[in-house]
Image: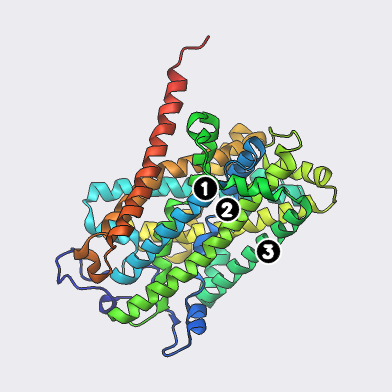
Amino acid sequence: MSTSDSRPTAESGAWRRTSETASLPEVHRSITVPKGASFWRKCLAFAGPGFLVAVGYMDPGNWATDLAGGAQFGYSLLFVIMASNLMAILLQHLCVKLGIATGRDLAQACRDHYSRPTVLFLWLICELAIAACDLAEVVGSAIALQLLFGIPLVWGCLITVLDVMIVLLLQHRGFRYLEAVVVTLIATIGTCFAVELFIAKPAVGAVMAGFIPSAAILHNPAMLYVAIGILGATVMPHNLYLHSSIVQTRKYEQDVGGKREAIKFATLDSTFALMFALFINAAILILAAAAFHTSGHAEVAAIQDAYHLLDGLMGVTFASVLFAVALLASGQNSTLTGTLAGQIVMEGFLNLRLRPWLRRLITRAIAVVPAVVVIGYFGESKSTELLVASQVCLSMQLGFACWPLMRFTGERAKMGEFVNPWWIKVLGWGTTLLIIGLNLKLLWDIFSDLLRPTK
């Protein structure tokens, strides 16, 4: 499917290619935006991609880092969740701009701009990020299946392969069906945690104080490690590639006015969805702080331990079931969108065209095989530690996605009148450099510990 009519020409010399295959060609521009519709009807028409992106901000990796942060440090890391969410809103807005203004997703833009060796390096880094992310999603779903039905973790990981067929079926019926399933699962997660918070009755004053920044994070290596894990679990590299692609599923006008309107409504969609993700992540940490930290169970970081302790600490018999149901919904949601992201990255960086079922089976295997091997080797008791480590790994790779995103959206030759204004450049580059700086400090701390002589 050629989309040269919807792509910007090389009149400015910015892009080396003037025509490419569309991102996600099977659903590209498949959802019509009604002309002359009211504000709310247009909001509804553009609603959906933001929730698919928000799924990555509330996946099982977030659960592990949020539980560890709440159990060990109480409400202190709530400001990290809030700051990470604000960074996410900014970065996802830039993905919307890139996809709509240029007709390219971030992977395609990288392939167009950089040399072949650089493109291959960025692709490998991104595949590693997706593998780390999918490891968290697969393990999280497997843990939920084990808690609810007693299924061993390895078998639970293999069951998650079925999401390949689910994505194919839903996308064949229309992209709206996939979005509807995702939104339903998100609503399930939100409902479960709203009930959990009502039962836990956290101290409101302490919760509000947790949103105030604290310098302790820079002086406590353990807190910094968990904080960077939260950052990596919240702002995910593959979400930047995913969002710049799926915003192009809407059939909006291709003139300047149509693109500007599309950017506005797509940004509203993603901002609303990410604020909902903020509630979920904060709720997990608040629940852990209220149930575990304040009751002397600061060592609780494993999802399985949290499940078994919740009923006794909260005084009701269904608290743990709600917890596991929300975890299962979270894991299944994330595997759906992770599979899509894998397809976008492979096609965008490599321009590799495979049959949809084969393409998704490959991206799924990249996640499931390492998960099964790691769990089989380390054992089920290490599953939560793997979740936290996978999120730190994600954070390490985030700079490699943020840097080209900031560069492309900041160049007038590539973006035209949609180029970032100066204040967006300041915030965006500040966010990128902060992410890179925190990761460098974490690496320094890790290597310093390794090189420090043992007593």
The residue shown at (46%, 12%) is 453
Describe the element under mark 2 as helix, strand or loop.
Answer: loop
Describe the element under mark 3 as helix, strand or loop.
Answer: helix
Name the amino acid type tagged 2.
Asp
Of callouts 2 and 1, which one flags the residue occurring earlier in the amino acid sequence? Answer: 2
Indicate which disc residue 188 carries.
Answer: 3
Indicate which disc residue 59 carries.
Answer: 2
Above-or-below relation of 43 to 130: below
Quadrant in the picture for residue 386: top right
The picture places residue 205, in percent across and down from the top left corner, at 67, 48
Few, some or many residues within 10 Å of mark 3 (<14, 14–19, 20+): some
Name the amino acid type tagged 3.
Thr
Number of numbered discs: 3
The residue shown at (47%, 51%) is 235
Q: Between marks 3 and 1, how big is the CA–CA gap?
A: 20 Å
Q: Look at the image and tell me whether residue 441 can be seen.
A: yes
